Image (cartoon, helix red, strand yellow):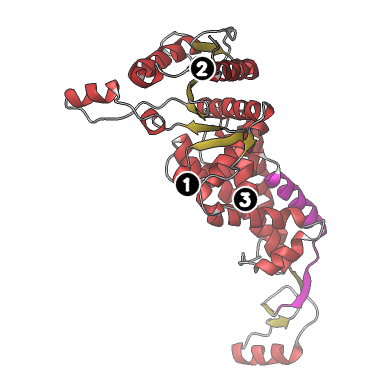
Amino acid sequence: MTEIGDALWLHLRGAVERVDQVPRALESVFGLRSNEFQELVAAHLLVGGIASEAVAAAKNVLESMPGTVIRVREDRPSAVTLPVRWPETLILRSVTRDPTRIVTSPPRRHYQTPLAVLVKTALATVGDLGSKLGDRDIGTARNPADRTLGEARTLLGHAKLAEVEQLTLPPRTIERFETRPATAALARLIRLARDALSFGEEKVVRGVVNSQVLAPAADDTLYEFLVGTRLTATLERIGFARARTHLLPHNQNLLFQGQRGRQVMTVWWQRSLTGVIPYISRYRLALEAAGLVPSALRPDLVLRSENPDAVLLVEIKYSEMEGASPDRVGLREMLSYAYDAESTLRDLPTPRGLIVAARSSGLPADHDFLIIDESRIDDAIRIVDRAWLESSVPVEV
């Protein structure tokens, strides 16, 4: 998962100007609802160990948390708690004409301290995360998340926190508590939750990207990034020096750009085919003729080579469709791309298509279209690279 997450983070971070814009980009990539990223943050903090560590720290702190002794004035008609405040008692008896009235000032332990506020705020933060998570399906992570939420609710009912007013702690106070071993987990949870939900804190956003909270609904998209990661890694292994590590906002579909000698290789993700190789699209013409809204075909990846001039369309499939295996579904779509762009592709060297399908038993072959699973990407790209280079070498007569 980390392999996919690192590539996805590179793509998302490069597609925006500021870290706090990454959540919107993530929602766009995975087709999430507006503000659904907050649910993902809540899931990550609840199941990633950050919240459970804070709850464990709260339990330990409460056991030894000191209070402040104060004197509380009490007017009791019967029970007497020393010391008795005799001057006020005599005045009270005179005013009320009740000889049983007694004013005392017994010592009481008071817990309205910054430490107690920190504990209560951290436990309340866990509850807030639970509210944001709601009924979201997070698979097997639901049980530990619910367990953490239950422990937090129990500790919030602790006698030492009963009269503690939950105040907003200044950032400097939170930073100070985060440097202390006993309270570090409490302060860290408060800071990360606050910053991630409000400002897109980088550590949490990256944690969401690298965690399992995007699955299983996003398995297909994650698989695309796995394939894209391995494909670009192979390009670097065969000599393409990455020319761009961060993507420009206006080129957010650019996954990789590298150079090897005079040859430049660009990898586009989910970009319209006509935007990479200009041609007259049969697909678009048919839609326009029928009076339908025109659109463009979008292969999952497109590799565009310059010097030599070549194109490789890549279709990535993870799930079955209507009973057909992922590789057969991918091949059908690849053939539609090839037919649509035939006017341009027929003049370019082969191979021109690569289908990467989960659980496929296909083997890399010397053919226009290669069908493989993710484990054979390296072999397939080397076959494509060799064929393209051979096609660019002049044949001696």
In the image: residue 197, left or right of residue 272: right
Task: From the image, give the main secondary structure of the stretch colored magenta.
Answer: helix
What residue is pinned by disc 2? 354
Q: Earlier in the sequence, mark 2 or mark 3?
A: 3
Point out the tag, 2 or 1, that comes first from the N-terminus.
1
**In the displayed structure image, the side of residue 356 where residue 348 appears, left or right:** left
The verdict on residue 66 being magenta is yes
Q: Is residue 93 left or right of residue 391?
A: right
Residue at 38% x, 33% y is 275
Q: Position of residue 108 (x, y in %)?
A: 76, 72
Q: Which residue is mark 3?
A: 202
Element carrying mark 2: strand
The label shown at residue 332 is: none
Give the label on residue 24, or none. 1
The quadrant where residue 133 appears: top right
Residue 351 at x, y percent in the picture = 51, 15
Q: CA distance from mark 2 to mark 1?
A: 31 Å
Structural distance between the alpha carbons of marks 2 and 3: 35 Å
Place of residue 112 in the rendered image (x, y in percent of width and height, measured from the top left): 70, 69
Verify whether residue 214 appears in magenta.
Answer: no
The image quarter containing residue 76 is bottom right
CB of mark 2 within 8 Å of CB of mark 1? Answer: no
Residue stretch rendered in magenta on the structure: 50-72
